Amino acid sequence: MKQIRYISVLFLLLLGFASCETYGDYEIEYSSIHPLGGKYRVTVTDETGGLVYRNFCEISNTTDGSTTKCWLRIGAYNLSGTNAYSINGKIDCNLNTLSFSGTDIENLAGNVATSTTTFTLTDGKVTLKGATAPSGTVSDAISFTFTNSRFPGRTFKAEGYRYTGWSTD
């Protein structure tokens, strides 16, 4: 009887060791605009420093995998429910300096195919580990200035941090 127990225990141990597979480290695939791309939480102020809105800003790669162009999307709804301040367009980016900009970019906010409105974005910059999110997590900082042809003569400043996913952020 003892032999059956020993054999059973030995069999279970051998089965346990044989079933453990170890895998190597996976290769992480980044987008063509890494580390610039991502989702950011931004606060937008006007030229007087007054709060215009808080929202998410997303920088994403283009479908052709360009390293010099990227999409920038930022949305904001006013009280009437329209995309008053939203901008969405393909801008220039520089991965070496983590900067981005664009002049007279067709504003495709609202996911439209064409638009008569434009925006200009200047001084776009991402600073790695340059911000602390509300959760206390060290995050990347983002800042840029933009104008929107829907609001002639007005300049807006967006500043924020890379969204961490924590509920407090």
Image: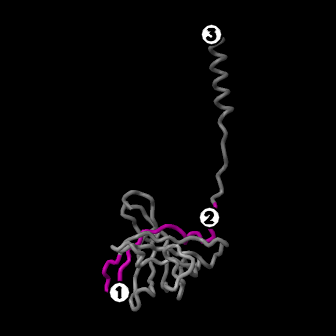
Give percent across and percent down for residue 140. 47, 69
Residue 30 colored in magenta in the image:
yes
Residue extending farthest to the bottom is 153
Q: Residue at x 41, y 61 (%)?
A: 137
Q: Where's the C terminus, which quadrant? A: bottom left
- Provide the residue designation for mark 1: 47
Among the two numbered marks 2 and 3 on one chain, the one whose residue lies closer to the N terminus: 3
- Secondary structure state at the residue bearing disc 2: loop
Give percent across and percent down for residue 109. 49, 76
Near-viewer residue (108 or 38)? 108
Q: Residues within 10 Å of mark 3 (few under 14, many from 20)?
A: few
Q: Residues within 10 Å of mark 1 (few under 14, many from 20)?
A: few
Residue 12 got which mark? none
Tag 1 and tag 2, C-beta contact below 8 Å: no
Disc 2 marks a residue whose amino acid type is Tyr
Gap between marks 3 and 1 measured at Cα: 85 Å
Gap between marks 2 and 3 measured at Cα: 57 Å
Near-viewer residue (31 or 132)? 31
- Provide the residue designation for mark 2: 30
**Magenta region, residue range:** 29-52
- Provide the residue designation for mark 3: 2
Question: Which is closer to the viewer, label 2 or label 3?
Answer: 2
Q: Where's the N terminus, which quadrant? A: top right
Compared to residue 69, the image places residue 28 above or below, namely: above
Residue 27 colored in magenta in the image:
no
Give percent across and percent down for residue 151. 40, 87
